[in-house]
Image (cartoon, rainbow, N blue to C red):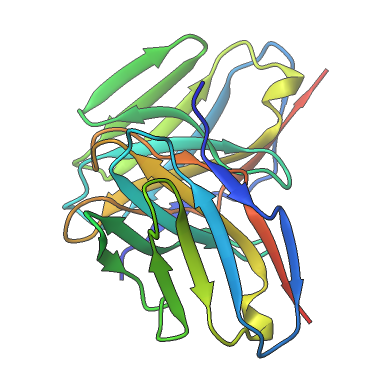
Protein backbone atom coordinates (compact mmCIF):
# COMPACT_ATOMS: atom_id res chain seq x y z
CA UNK A 1 0.00 0.00 0.00
CA UNK A 2 1.54 3.27 -1.08
CA UNK A 3 1.15 5.97 1.53
CA UNK A 4 1.89 9.64 1.83
CA UNK A 5 1.70 10.88 5.39
CA UNK A 6 1.35 14.44 6.57
CA UNK A 7 0.62 15.94 9.95
CA UNK A 8 -2.92 17.27 9.51
CA UNK A 9 -2.29 20.18 11.87
CA UNK A 10 -3.59 22.74 12.28
CA UNK A 11 -0.27 24.52 12.24
CA UNK A 12 -0.32 28.13 13.38
CA UNK A 13 2.55 30.55 12.92
CA UNK A 14 2.78 34.31 13.41
CA UNK A 15 3.15 36.56 10.40
CA UNK A 16 6.78 36.82 9.33
CA UNK A 17 7.78 33.48 10.86
CA UNK A 18 8.96 30.34 9.09
CA UNK A 19 6.36 27.62 8.57
CA UNK A 20 7.69 24.08 8.28
CA UNK A 21 5.56 21.38 6.67
CA UNK A 22 6.58 17.74 6.58
CA UNK A 23 5.71 14.70 4.52
CA UNK A 24 6.84 11.07 4.46
CA UNK A 25 6.19 8.54 1.73
CA UNK A 26 6.35 4.77 1.55
CA UNK A 27 7.17 4.00 -2.10
CA UNK A 28 10.95 3.97 -2.55
CA UNK A 29 10.42 3.97 -6.31
CA UNK A 30 8.94 7.45 -6.28
CA UNK A 31 10.97 9.92 -8.27
CA UNK A 32 9.09 13.19 -8.19
CA UNK A 33 7.67 15.12 -5.27
CA UNK A 34 5.27 18.01 -5.31
CA UNK A 35 3.79 20.56 -2.96
CA UNK A 36 0.35 21.95 -3.70
CA UNK A 37 -1.58 24.66 -1.90
CA UNK A 38 -5.33 24.31 -1.60
CA UNK A 39 -7.62 27.05 -0.37
CA UNK A 40 -10.95 25.93 1.03
CA UNK A 41 -13.32 24.93 -1.75
CA UNK A 42 -10.71 25.48 -4.45
CA UNK A 43 -8.53 23.22 -6.56
CA UNK A 44 -4.92 22.38 -5.70
CA UNK A 45 -2.37 24.87 -6.97
CA UNK A 46 1.21 23.75 -7.63
CA UNK A 47 3.82 25.52 -5.52
CA UNK A 48 6.97 23.50 -6.08
CA UNK A 49 8.37 20.22 -7.29
CA UNK A 50 11.64 18.51 -6.44
CA UNK A 51 13.41 15.45 -7.84
CA UNK A 52 16.89 15.48 -6.34
CA UNK A 53 18.07 15.12 -2.78
CA UNK A 54 18.75 18.42 -1.10
CA UNK A 55 17.11 21.81 -1.16
CA UNK A 56 15.32 23.69 -3.89
CA UNK A 57 14.41 27.32 -3.38
CA UNK A 58 11.79 29.41 -5.15
CA UNK A 59 11.14 32.81 -3.63
CA UNK A 60 9.88 32.37 -0.08
CA UNK A 61 9.49 28.62 -0.53
CA UNK A 62 12.13 25.93 -0.03
CA UNK A 63 11.49 22.26 -0.69
CA UNK A 64 13.77 19.70 0.91
CA UNK A 65 14.08 16.07 -0.15
CA UNK A 66 15.79 13.17 1.58
CA UNK A 67 15.17 9.98 -0.40
CA UNK A 68 17.08 7.79 2.07
CA UNK A 69 14.70 8.85 4.83
CA UNK A 70 11.73 9.07 2.42
CA UNK A 71 11.04 12.55 3.65
CA UNK A 72 9.99 15.77 1.92
CA UNK A 73 9.47 19.12 3.55
CA UNK A 74 8.37 22.60 2.62
CA UNK A 75 9.59 25.73 4.35
CA UNK A 76 7.73 28.99 3.93
CA UNK A 77 9.78 31.99 4.97
CA UNK A 78 8.27 35.33 5.97
CA UNK A 79 4.84 33.73 6.24
CA UNK A 80 1.92 35.93 5.20
CA UNK A 81 -1.78 35.66 6.13
CA UNK A 82 -2.43 34.86 2.46
CA UNK A 83 -0.36 31.68 2.94
CA UNK A 84 -3.13 30.34 5.19
CA UNK A 85 -4.33 27.23 3.35
CA UNK A 86 -4.00 23.47 3.30
CA UNK A 87 -0.70 22.23 1.89
CA UNK A 88 -0.76 18.94 0.05
CA UNK A 89 2.25 16.74 -0.49
CA UNK A 90 2.06 14.60 -3.64
CA UNK A 91 4.34 11.81 -4.80
CA UNK A 92 4.42 10.15 -8.20
CA UNK A 93 3.67 6.44 -8.30
CA UNK A 94 2.25 3.98 -10.77
CA UNK A 95 3.57 2.08 -13.73
CA UNK A 96 4.23 5.15 -15.82
CA UNK A 97 5.05 7.43 -12.92
CA UNK A 98 2.35 9.88 -13.83
CA UNK A 99 -0.12 8.99 -11.11
CA UNK A 100 0.11 11.06 -7.94
CA UNK A 101 -0.58 9.94 -4.40
CA UNK A 102 -1.61 12.83 -2.22
CA UNK A 103 -1.33 13.22 1.51
CA UNK A 104 -4.29 14.42 3.52
CA UNK A 105 -2.70 17.86 3.79
CA UNK A 106 -1.54 20.14 6.57
CA UNK A 107 -3.72 23.09 7.47
CA UNK A 108 -1.64 26.23 7.98
CA UNK A 109 -2.88 29.42 9.62
CA UNK A 110 -0.69 32.52 9.59
CA UNK A 111 -1.72 34.86 12.37
CA UNK A 112 -1.39 38.60 11.62
CA UNK B 1 -1.68 31.87 -18.05
CA UNK B 2 -3.33 28.86 -19.73
CA UNK B 3 -6.05 27.20 -17.70
CA UNK B 4 -7.82 23.89 -17.43
CA UNK B 5 -11.53 24.60 -17.67
CA UNK B 6 -14.21 22.43 -16.06
CA UNK B 7 -17.97 22.55 -16.44
CA UNK B 8 -20.31 22.61 -14.68
CA UNK B 9 -18.96 24.02 -11.45
CA UNK B 10 -21.72 22.29 -9.49
CA UNK B 11 -23.93 19.38 -10.52
CA UNK B 12 -26.76 17.95 -8.46
CA UNK B 13 -28.13 14.62 -9.61
CA UNK B 14 -30.40 11.91 -8.33
CA UNK B 15 -28.98 8.56 -7.35
CA UNK B 16 -28.92 6.20 -10.30
CA UNK B 17 -28.71 8.94 -12.90
CA UNK B 18 -25.87 9.35 -15.38
CA UNK B 19 -23.66 12.41 -15.23
CA UNK B 20 -21.00 13.73 -17.57
CA UNK B 21 -18.34 16.05 -16.25
CA UNK B 22 -16.53 18.10 -18.82
CA UNK B 23 -13.00 19.41 -19.02
CA UNK B 24 -11.02 21.41 -21.54
CA UNK B 25 -7.32 20.73 -20.87
CA UNK B 26 -4.54 23.14 -21.79
CA UNK B 27 -4.23 22.98 -25.56
CA UNK B 28 -0.69 21.61 -25.98
CA UNK B 29 -0.87 19.16 -23.09
CA UNK B 30 -0.72 15.47 -23.88
CA UNK B 31 -1.67 13.74 -20.63
CA UNK B 32 -5.04 14.12 -18.95
CA UNK B 33 -6.31 13.02 -15.58
CA UNK B 34 -9.32 12.86 -13.35
CA UNK B 35 -9.02 13.05 -9.59
CA UNK B 36 -11.68 13.32 -6.94
CA UNK B 37 -11.77 14.69 -3.41
CA UNK B 38 -14.52 13.69 -1.02
CA UNK B 39 -15.20 16.48 1.44
CA UNK B 40 -12.53 16.56 4.13
CA UNK B 41 -10.52 13.76 2.56
CA UNK B 42 -7.47 13.44 0.37
CA UNK B 43 -7.26 13.99 -3.35
CA UNK B 44 -7.55 10.56 -5.02
CA UNK B 45 -6.42 9.45 -8.46
CA UNK B 46 -9.10 8.06 -10.74
CA UNK B 47 -7.63 7.71 -14.21
CA UNK B 48 -4.94 8.93 -16.58
CA UNK B 49 -5.39 9.23 -20.34
CA UNK B 50 -2.80 9.50 -23.08
CA UNK B 51 -2.86 9.04 -26.82
CA UNK B 52 -6.61 8.44 -26.78
CA UNK B 53 -6.56 5.62 -24.30
CA UNK B 54 -6.49 5.00 -20.59
CA UNK B 55 -2.92 4.57 -19.35
CA UNK B 56 -3.65 3.93 -15.68
CA UNK B 57 -6.71 3.69 -13.48
CA UNK B 58 -7.35 3.21 -9.79
CA UNK B 59 -9.59 0.77 -7.96
CA UNK B 60 -12.13 3.58 -7.65
CA UNK B 61 -12.47 3.74 -11.42
CA UNK B 62 -14.78 0.77 -11.83
CA UNK B 63 -17.19 -0.11 -14.63
CA UNK B 64 -19.47 2.76 -13.66
CA UNK B 65 -16.84 5.23 -14.83
CA UNK B 66 -15.63 6.00 -18.32
CA UNK B 67 -13.57 8.70 -19.95
CA UNK B 68 -13.57 10.03 -23.45
CA UNK B 69 -11.85 12.62 -25.55
CA UNK B 70 -14.58 13.11 -28.13
CA UNK B 71 -12.79 15.85 -30.06
CA UNK B 72 -9.50 17.68 -29.98
CA UNK B 73 -10.33 19.81 -26.98
CA UNK B 74 -12.76 18.16 -24.56
CA UNK B 75 -12.06 15.44 -22.02
CA UNK B 76 -15.07 13.95 -20.24
CA UNK B 77 -15.75 11.75 -17.24
CA UNK B 78 -18.99 9.81 -17.27
CA UNK B 79 -20.53 8.13 -14.26
CA UNK B 80 -23.23 5.79 -15.50
CA UNK B 81 -25.33 5.21 -12.40
CA UNK B 82 -24.42 7.58 -9.62
CA UNK B 83 -24.32 6.52 -5.99
CA UNK B 84 -24.46 8.68 -2.88
CA UNK B 85 -20.78 7.97 -2.26
CA UNK B 86 -19.87 9.51 -5.62
CA UNK B 87 -20.56 12.92 -4.11
CA UNK B 88 -17.23 14.73 -4.25
CA UNK B 89 -15.21 17.41 -5.99
CA UNK B 90 -13.93 16.10 -9.29
CA UNK B 91 -10.78 17.67 -10.64
CA UNK B 92 -9.48 17.42 -14.15
CA UNK B 93 -5.74 17.91 -14.67
CA UNK B 94 -3.39 18.00 -17.59
CA UNK B 95 0.33 18.06 -18.22
CA UNK B 96 2.54 18.30 -21.26
CA UNK B 97 5.02 15.59 -20.27
CA UNK B 98 4.18 13.03 -17.60
CA UNK B 99 6.43 12.72 -14.59
CA UNK B 100 8.32 15.91 -15.30
CA UNK B 101 6.37 18.74 -13.77
CA UNK B 102 3.28 18.97 -11.63
CA UNK B 103 -0.21 18.97 -13.03
CA UNK B 104 -2.33 21.98 -13.72
CA UNK B 105 -5.69 21.31 -12.10
CA UNK B 106 -9.00 22.69 -13.24
CA UNK B 107 -11.27 24.53 -10.83
CA UNK B 108 -13.31 21.39 -10.22
CA UNK B 109 -16.89 20.20 -10.44
CA UNK B 110 -18.75 19.65 -7.21
CA UNK B 111 -20.98 16.63 -7.72
CA UNK B 112 -23.81 16.14 -5.25
CA UNK B 113 -25.80 12.92 -5.49
CA UNK B 114 -29.14 13.01 -3.68
Give the camera-side residue of A90 and A14: A90
B108 relative to B13 in the view: left or right: left
Give the camera-side residue of A35 and A73: A35
* Farthest-out residue, right: A112
Residue A4 percent across, percent down from the top left:
40, 55
Q: Quadrant of the C terminus of chain B?
A: bottom right
Residue at screen point 48% across, 53% down: A103
Residue at screen point 40% across, 60% down: B70
A67 relative to B29 in the view: left or right: left
* Farthest-out residue, front: B71
Q: Inspect this view and state whether residue B81 appears.
A: yes
In this rendering, the answer to whether B18 lies above or below B25 is below
A109 relative to A90 in the view: left or right: right
In this rendering, the answer to whether B51 lies above or below B3 is below
Residue B66 percent across, percent down from the top left:
42, 74
In this rendering, the answer to whether A84 lies above or below A90 is above
Residue at screen point 52% across, 12% down: A60
Amino acid sequence: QKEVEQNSGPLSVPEGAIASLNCTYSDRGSQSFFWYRQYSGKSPELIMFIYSNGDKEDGRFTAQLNKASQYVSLLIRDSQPSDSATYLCAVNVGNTGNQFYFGTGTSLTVIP
Amino acid sequence: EPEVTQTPSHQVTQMGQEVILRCVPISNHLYFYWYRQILGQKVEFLVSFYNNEISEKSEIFDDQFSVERPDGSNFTLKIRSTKLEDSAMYFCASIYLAGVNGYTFGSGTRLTVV
